[in-house]
Amino acid sequence: MRYLIIGGSAAGISTVEAIRSVDRTSPIELFSNEGTPFYSRVLLSYYVAGAITKEELHFRPLEFFMENRVTAYLGQRVKQVLPDSKNIRMEDGREYPYDKLLIATGSSPKILDIPGKDKKGVIVMRYIEHAQEIVDRLDGIKTACILGGGLIGLRTGYALSLRGVKVKLIVKSGQVLSQMLDRDAAQMVEGTMREHGIDVRTGRDAVEIVGRESVEGILLDNGERITCQLVVIGKGVQPNVDCVSSTKVKVNEGIVADETMRTTVPDIYVAGDVAETYDLSTEKMGMNAIWPCAFEQGRVAGLNMAGRKAHYNGSFRMNSLDFYGLLVISMGVTRPEGGGFEQFQRRAKETYRKLVLKDGRIVGAILVGQVQRAGVLTTLLKKKINVSGYASFLMSDRLNFADLLPLIGKNKEKFTEVEYRELTRRPKG
Amino acid sequence: MKVIKVDQEKCTQCHTCGLWCGVEIGSVAKEPNDAIHEEPRPVPRVHVDGNNLPLHCRHCEVAPCIDACPNGTMRRDPKTGLVYVHEPTCVACWMCVMVCPFGIITPSSGHHVAVKCDRCRNMEFPICVDVCPTKALILEEREKGATWYGYSPSRSF
């Protein structure tokens, strides 16, 4: 068996670990267009903030490939997958054959098409080179403008403000983090950022980036000009699907995965940001480009590639953030549209909680301020448990696992893992 | 792999487990009289949840916290299968808090690292099991056939 993996971040590495847990000897070849392996994209803003070193970005040790007997081709781009001949073709024309292929090509930042976007000092935050560029130029940056109110933009802005840079956050929509939070939660985040000197401008868009060769400022849609030395673009990501163009591998927005993380073509699997999977919260196919999903999908793909039967129930969007000590966790559908939803909200001075139910099941939640035991909600969402009658308990600070044991007993068929069985049985003693 | 099992019928909610875990594992002083005055406050790794369920890390076979951890801070001991926090690399991103099914991972007092039970993997015997006056906590072998999965540095495949 010859395994071939395209992509060396979360999904690719998780797949390697899964394959090696079953098959210790077959050759694994891994291709990554990045020269630096094993760094955690999620933590790049922590590096920009100076909170961690470059070494602390590593999610696996550098010996990983050697220990797992992986032949790694780093800094080399795969141009095309050739399903008919079961080969991949590189940019320089070289071809490599596979028996089982994983596509974990990830996603790329969406390009912002405004005049001046190619000037020096305009950066999208995606790769380690981008973070390094910001760190290298820190001395010359007094003011930075972040275009986009998504998580990457906010995290980068937060990091820069910790470095003493004056940060202006330009958000086109009426609130920050519109994918993650409702208005109430977003206002708390915006309030905290403003308190710490970040200038948050919602409902505003940049129309031009000005300067000669380098950035000197931006022009807003209300005619205002802001002087800055750095522009960070955070307008979201799009899946890297080019390598399967003109093949029978089905692509909607991303590469469509089935319940085994296989694509529509035999022996070709997919995982991570590039995969389009069943979304447990929306009950539709969708993209959930987040780290935990990439790891879980990689494991399922890897086990199936290696001949085990592993099932992927589906993904849902979730994220956690911590700005100046304000902890926020959000999951699933938080701003439901259309009928059939039940919503519960509780706002106190420093905390906020929201729960969104559909047909008695949790499909979304937001926790601000107090995030302890958020994972209990995550698990109930993931396992599609009917929580009718528990809503006020789940909304309260009393939320705990023990008081849910009756519910778990009622849904035994969904809590089959040994860790749950152990807790619902009396030990022999 | 041995795990801590709970006999709810024997638990009297005395919280002795949490008290001693906070002293032995959570505190710097390791003496109750000093530990109660310590700042930041020591965090116990076991809590009596609800009425009578002392809850620790369950060391899930497939641990969501290991999946979610963005830099390999959450990992398994390759010899025992126990899940632990490699504190020096924890960046306090709370991804693990977001996914722990049992809600047992908590931010430390200073919010600098994630804190959770590692079943006293470096000690001879878990302190909570040792001190439980009614023997509601028992160290027992996990059932046969159970396996585990997830990042364990230098696990030899």
Image (spheres, grey):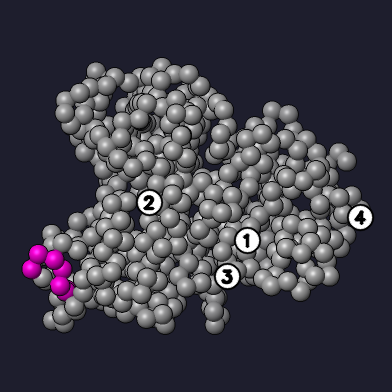
Q: Are marks 3 and 2 on the same chain?
A: yes
Q: Which residue is mark 3?
A: A370
**Looking at the image, which residue is at 88% across and 60% down?**
B12
Question: Comparing marks 2 and 1, which lies closer to the viewer?
Answer: 2
Q: Are marks 2 and 1 on the same chain?
A: no
- The relative height of residue A64 versus residue A198 in the rendered view (above or below) is above
Parent chain of label 1: B
Would you say the residues marked 3 and 2 are in contact, meaning their CB atoms lie under 8 Å apart?
Answer: no
Q: CA distance from mark 3 to mark 2?
A: 26 Å
Q: Are marks 2 and 4 on the same chain?
A: no
Are there few (<14), some (14-19), or many (20+) residues within 10 Å of tag 2? many
Q: Which residue is mark 4?
A: B133
Parent chain of label 3: A
Parent chain of label 2: A
Give the label on residue A41, or none: 2
Q: Which residue is mark 1?
A: B106
Question: Comparing marks 2 and 4, which lies closer to the viewer?
Answer: 2
Q: Quadrant of the N terminus of chain A?
A: top left
Q: CA distance from mark 3 to mark 4?
A: 33 Å
Q: Nearer the viewer, residue A352 or B125?
A: B125
- The relative height of residue A325 versus residue A319 in the rendered view (above or below) is below
Are there few (<14), some (14-19), or many (20+) residues within 10 Å of tag 1? many
Q: Position of residue A169 (x, y in %)?
A: 29, 73
Q: CA distance from mark 1 to mark 4?
A: 26 Å
Magenta segment, principal secondary structure?
A: loop
Q: Quadrant of the C terminus of chain A?
A: top right
Would you say the residues marked 1 and 3 are in contact, meaning their CB atoms lie under 8 Å apart?
Answer: no
Q: Is residue A214 magenta?
A: yes
- Give the left or right position of residue B149, taking residue A313 as reference: right
Please report the bounds of the magenta region as a residue range: A212-218
Name the kind of residue labelled 4 in the image.
Answer: Pro
